[in-house]
Image: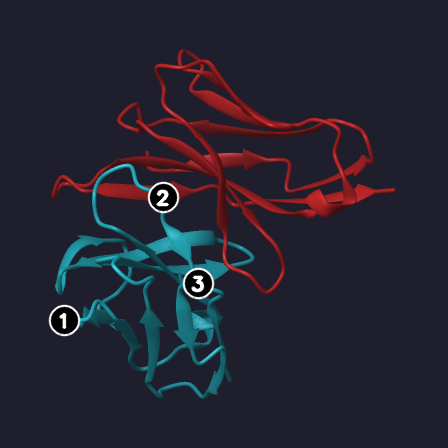
Amino acid sequence: QQQVKQSPQSLIVQKGGISIINCAYENTAFDYFPWYQQFPGKGPALLIAIRPDVSEKKEGRFTISFNKSAKQFSLHIMDSQPGDSATYFCAASSRSSGGYQKVTFGTGTKLQVIP
Amino acid sequence: KAGVTQTPRYLIKTRGQQVTLSCSPISGHRSVSWYQQTPGQGLQFLFEYFSETQRNKGNFPGRFSGRQFSNSRSEMNVSTLELGDSALYLCASKLGGEWETQYFGPGTRLLVL
């Protein structure tokens, strides 16, 4: 029930195209949904995050769409650039039994943007 | 501000040995979390420390343990290493409150032979 399922595992997009990564969850206790970007040799870095009371959040070329009833959320990267080539992780956060925030990550999507 | 630092960056051990990894959080951050990253399982939460106390724990065996010092630096220890422990171990720090961004270090890559 703590799983976050992410797809696709890998994605190749042409420069200027739209990259779409999808995630689904079962646990309705999740109440915070961040996306992380990870470049080789680096730790993940927060890209954008959304709360379930909002259906969409946009920051620059990055947009999260959230469908609470379907328990799905997705990341859209508009006008994808070669510099966006990285691994992207969706995540979901809930409170542990001790009442503290606990983050569960998806398995990651390796994005390659080709010129 | 300096970011999260982890030492060592790379480590090779043999089965049965133990290993200690170190993490220095961003100055002022009191929460440190540890994650294991593998190609098959992705990022899995190990535990979180706040003010020298473990306040969150993932589903890992007791061979994985940690501690946090009064300066918020944290160590993670894995005893009786198994081949399956080969992974990138990441630590992340944050101030400590809810819904804050956590900042990841570059990780320690552990190879168990």
Could you say which is closer to the camera, residue A114 or residue A105? A114
Residue at 42% in and 19% down: A71
Residue occupying the far front of the picture: B1
Residue density around tag 3, few if under 14, some if 14–19, many if 20 or more, within 10 Å = many
- Give the amino acid type for the residue marked by disc 3 in the picture: Gly
Q: Residue B30, relative to residue A67: is it above or below?
A: below
The mark that comes first in sequence, 2 or 1, is 1
The residue singled out by tag 1 in the image is B70
Of the chain colours in the picture, the one used for chain B is cyan
Could you say which is closer to the camera, residue B22 or residue B56? B22
Q: Residue B100: which quarter of the image?
A: top left
Q: In which quarter of the image is the N terminus of chain B?
A: bottom left
- Give the amino acid type for the residue marked by disc 2 in the picture: Thr
Provide the chain ID for the residue under circle 3.
Answer: B
Provide the chain ID for the residue under circle 2.
Answer: B
Q: Residue A90, relative to residue B26: is it above or below?
A: above
SS state under label 1:
loop
Provide the chain ID for the residue under circle 1.
Answer: B
The residue singled out by tag 3 in the image is B105
The mark that comes first in sequence, 1 or 3, is 1
Residue density around tag 2, few if under 14, some if 14–19, many if 20 or more, within 10 Å = some
Lateral position of residue A97 relative to residue A2, left or right: left
Q: Where is residue B107 in the image (x, y as percent from the top left)?
A: 46, 67
Of the chain colours in the picture, the one used for chain A is red
Q: How far apart are marks 2 and 3 (CA)?
A: 13 Å
SS state under label 2:
loop
Checking the image for residue A5, the label placed there is none
Q: Position of residue B91 (x, y in %)?
A: 37, 62
Residue density around tag 1, few if under 14, some if 14–19, many if 20 or more, within 10 Å = few
The residue singled out by tag 2 in the image is B101
- Give the amino acid type for the residue marked by disc 1 in the picture: Ser
Q: Where is residue A19 in the image (x, y as percent from the top left)?
A: 70, 30
